[in-house]
Amino acid sequence: MFSDGEKRLRFLRWRIQFLERSIRKLDFRSGGVSSIFQINDLKNSPGPAKGELRLATRQALQLLQDNYPEFVAKQVFINAPWWYLAFYTMISPFMTQRTKSKFVFASTARTPETLFKYVNPEHVPIQYGGLSVDYCDCNPEFTIEDPASVVTVKPATKQTVEIIVNEKCLFVWEIRVVGWEVSYSAEYVPNNDSHYTIIIQKARKMTQTDEPVISHSFKITELGKILLTIDNPTSKKKTLLYRFKVCPLSE
């Protein structure tokens, strides 16, 4: 992409064209969307030794800064390698203070946590720690219209999410802990104390190689509550995502 001047110019044209297409979607009326939030994935990007990359970056920054100064609210760089901050330090003198204030950097480990500060998890693609799967058939129950909750699970603690169910229904939920390395269990506790608690999912140790999102459903014929429990034995805090919906029982 940056091997010669012609390819570098093609990249710059594409970059400006991409911004122009985004600008067409803005709505400057009261209450409308009037700024752009951009996420740049730096995974597998070429190293700082590539002079053409440094030159292309400076040219892009100059074009954007001079001609589109207030369109972008934030530029978030995710999966940022260690060398990129050093590279940013080198090019920062070419930016205005206003431009620099819009930049946010996140390492691979902090990418999901950083994205959730700005984007709801149901809109974040699954490969970046969220729940969005681009409307594929593997997740027919939920779309980006179904909001998710975010809970921080402290190190060496157990976190239980309690969901009260006030009607007979088919209760459907999905759950994810970014990076897993925790144990997950689910149970149903009826309101009637004389009835037994039902184990839906025995405590299961989840690893990073397991499916990123776990989906479950449970037919509820008496009122009670769903308990979703995450046991975090690690020395790191974990981010728990979950969402649910209530579906009427078929006659």
Image (cartoon, rainbow, N blue to C red):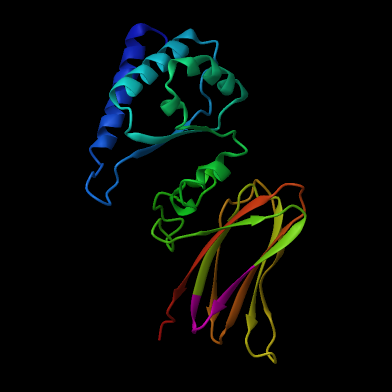
Report x, y in % for residue 128. Answer: 52, 42
Locate the N terminus and report the quarter of the image it occupies.
Answer: top left
Q: Is residue 106 left or right of residue 139?
A: right
Q: Nearer the viewer, residue 64 or 231?
A: 64
Residue 1 seen from this side = no
Residue 116 shown in magenta: no
Residue 140 visible at all: yes
Please identify the dominant SS of the magenta region: strand
Q: Quadrant of the C terminus?
A: bottom left
Image position of 80 with respect to 148: above or below:
above
Q: Position of residue 161 (x, y in %)?
A: 62, 67
- Give the residue at x 33% y 40%: 35
The part of the image, by quadrant, that contains residue 144 is: bottom left
Range of residues picked out in magenta: 161-170
Q: Residue at x 26, y 31 (%)?
A: 20
User: In this orientation, which residue lies closer to the viewer: 68 or 164?
Assistant: 68
Q: Is residue 54 above or below residue 167?
A: above
Q: Position of residue 214 (x, y in %)?
A: 57, 59
User: Relative to 169, does residue 234 appear above or below in the rendering?
Assistant: above
- The residue located at (29%, 36%) in the rendering is 22
Is residue 165 part of the magenta span, yes or no? yes
